[in-house]
Amino acid sequence: MYCLEIRDHIMIAHSFKGAFFGPAQNMHGATFIVDVAFFRAQLSQENVVVDIGRALDALKAVLKPLNYQNLDAIPEFEGIQTTTEFLARHIFDKMAQAAHAGELGPGGEGIGRMRVTLHESHVAKGGYEADMPIQKAQA
């Protein structure tokens, strides 16, 4: 399996509800380093996994609505615990949509699997990895 990985970062603020989260119930900030890995069994016609520049542009577009935001104030996340793992899945879904929309360039449709990892600190990271959802045919 071939792999290509790209990286960016976001700075967010949020809080959690419930004793499970201890002091993280208070408003706090996080700077996440965001890695997205693309996997495919065969290289594209151009001999790449995916176009690095287009993948970076897509990731920047996905992260822009989150960067420098209080996630508690974003209507889409109302009532949701915006944990590292949850955010990794959110970013995965948005990057999968970008791939299906052709935003990763020619060959992006051949990505078979993707992994999103959010590095919280030098001692902790979380993520989401799955096969790429099958694109639905346009009606």
Image (cartoon, grey):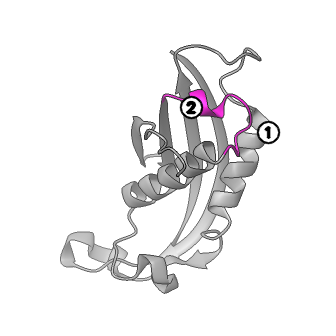
Task: Assign a secondary structure to mark 2.
Answer: strand
Magenta stretch, overall SS: loop
Q: Is residue 28 visible?
A: no
Task: Give the vertical position of 46 relative to 12 (above or below).
Answer: above
The amino acid sitting under disc 2 is Phe
Image position of 81 (left or right of 5): left
Q: Nearer the viewer, residue 125 or 89?
A: 89
Task: Give the vertical position of 115 relative to 68 (above or below).
Answer: above
> Which disc is residue 85 wearing?
none
Task: Assign a secondary structure to mark 1.
Answer: helix
How far apart are the two marked residues, 1 and 2, measured between alpha carbons? 13 Å
Q: To which residue does mark 1 refer?
A: 53
Q: Residue at x 49, y 28 (%)?
A: 112
Whether residue 97 appears in magenta in the rendering, the answer is: no
Q: Residue at x 64, y 69 (%)?
A: 67
Q: Residue at x 75, y 34 (%)?
A: 52
Image position of 47 (left or right of 108): right
- Dividing the picture into quadrants, the one containing residue 130 is top left
Check disc 2: other Cα within 10 Å, few if <14, some if 14-19, many if 20+: many
Residue 90 in the image: state x and y as whole percent: 46, 58
| Among the two numbered marks 1 and 2 on one chain, the one whose residue lies closer to the N terminus | 2
> Which disc is residue 38 wearing?
2
The amino acid sitting under disc 1 is Gly
Q: Residue pushed farthest front?
A: 139
Residue 70 in the image: state x and y as whole percent: 54, 80
Q: Magenta part of the protein: which range?
A: 102-112
